[in-house]
Amino acid sequence: MGEFINPASVPKVTFYNGVEVPCVGMGTFGSDRFTPEQVSGAVAGAIRCGYRMFDCAACYGNEDQIGQVFQDAFDEGVVERSELFIMTKVWNDMHERVEESCRKSIADLKCGYIDLFFIHWPFPNYHAPGCDVDSRNPDSMPFSTEEFIRTYRQCEELVEKGLIRNIGISNMTIPKLEAVLPLMKILPVACEMELHPCFQQQELFDYLNDHKIQPIGFMPLGSPQRPERDICPEDVADMQTPEMQEIAKAHGVHPALIALKWARQRGQIPIPFSVHEVEYVSNLKSMTEDPLTEEEMAKIATLEKNNRLVKGQVFLWEGANDWHDLWDEDGVIVTL
């Protein structure tokens, strides 16, 4: 087993409802590059090294393997269920059957309940696993407030039934939030969104904080391991910028750890992923030591390049211009 980082030493974040969670989690998306066995093996090691938050999803195709890891950890007394904060998501093709999706995730993850349950994308547009970037589903449609709220109502019912403890949203925009927040009975505690030094989403980040919704950042390192279909020639490699290299050299660490320190100190919860023990241990340990200076934080703030890496092309509908239509960049929800 690798180095153990005492979970009590990892800083905490408190949701608007008083729930306290670690300031960093571990991702479980294998990015089409790692097998379920590799991912679940990393989760097993991460639990024993001190991780207590795990970000899962039905569409990642590995929840049953991760669930066996959780069960083994419970059975062996490594950790109790109450010590873990387990997150998962309903996939786009299950928006009309949210409880079915949730119950399957609970059964696969062998966890009894879900701590935080996300709507993975704000529309039911479905694509097959591993599909080409140019793939399109003829049934795909633009965002609909009515459809989203039908899905969200089912999540609220899951809270009432005790199947989930908190609701989350993901891949949202300010115009979409403006449309749906007034209609919710239980407000979301968190929003998962792409966040890294070259894609800081400051306006949305501030909006979420103003509405007491915790930002959770996926792809916190700029995701060099993301699927090939999401890679474009114009993408920027965050870790290779001179500023990140300079700060990393000053701290004697890899630029990835600088990105994670920046994320924590800025106020988002980063969800890094790695199957390599030396990396996931150092990711967690970096949260507990050697913070960035105000000057270094200010320097990283200048790296914003609007460098969205997950563009969502496969979710586009007939008649859409391009992936920009998914993100309401003109301040209004794009419709047919």
Image: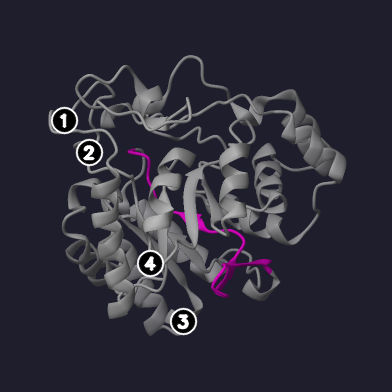
Residue at position x 22%, y 27% in the image: 317
Residue type beneath disc 4: Lys
Whether label 4 touches label 2, CB < 8 Å = no
Q: Main secondary structure of the magenta part?
A: loop
Q: Position of residue 224 (x, y in %)?
A: 50, 32
The answer to which of 71 and 58 lies nearer the viewer is 58
- Which residue is identified by label 2? 125
- In the picture, the disc for residue 185 is 4
Q: Nearer the viewer, mark 4 or mark 2?
A: 4
- In the picture, the disc for residue 82 is 3
Residue type beneath disc 1: Asn
Whether label 2 touches label 1, CB < 8 Å = yes
Q: Earlier in the sequence, mark 4 or mark 3?
A: 3
Q: Position of residue 23 (x, y in %)?
A: 62, 61
Which structural element holds mark 2? loop
Q: Nearer the viewer, mark 1 or mark 4?
A: 4
Residue type beneath disc 3: Ser
Q: Earlier in the sequence, mark 3 or mark 1?
A: 3
Q: Is residue 135 above or below residue 223?
A: above
Q: Badge 1 local density, few (<14 within 10 Å), some, or many (20+)?
A: some
Which structural element holds mark 4? loop
- Which residue is identified by label 1? 137
Residue at position x 56%, y 56% in the image: 211
Q: Quadrant of the N terminus?
A: bottom right
Q: Nearer the viewer, mark 3 or mark 2?
A: 2
Residue at position x 77%, y 59% in the image: 289
Residue span colored magenta: 10-32
Residue 72 seen anywhere in this rendered image of the structure = yes
Whether label 4 touches label 3, CB < 8 Å = no
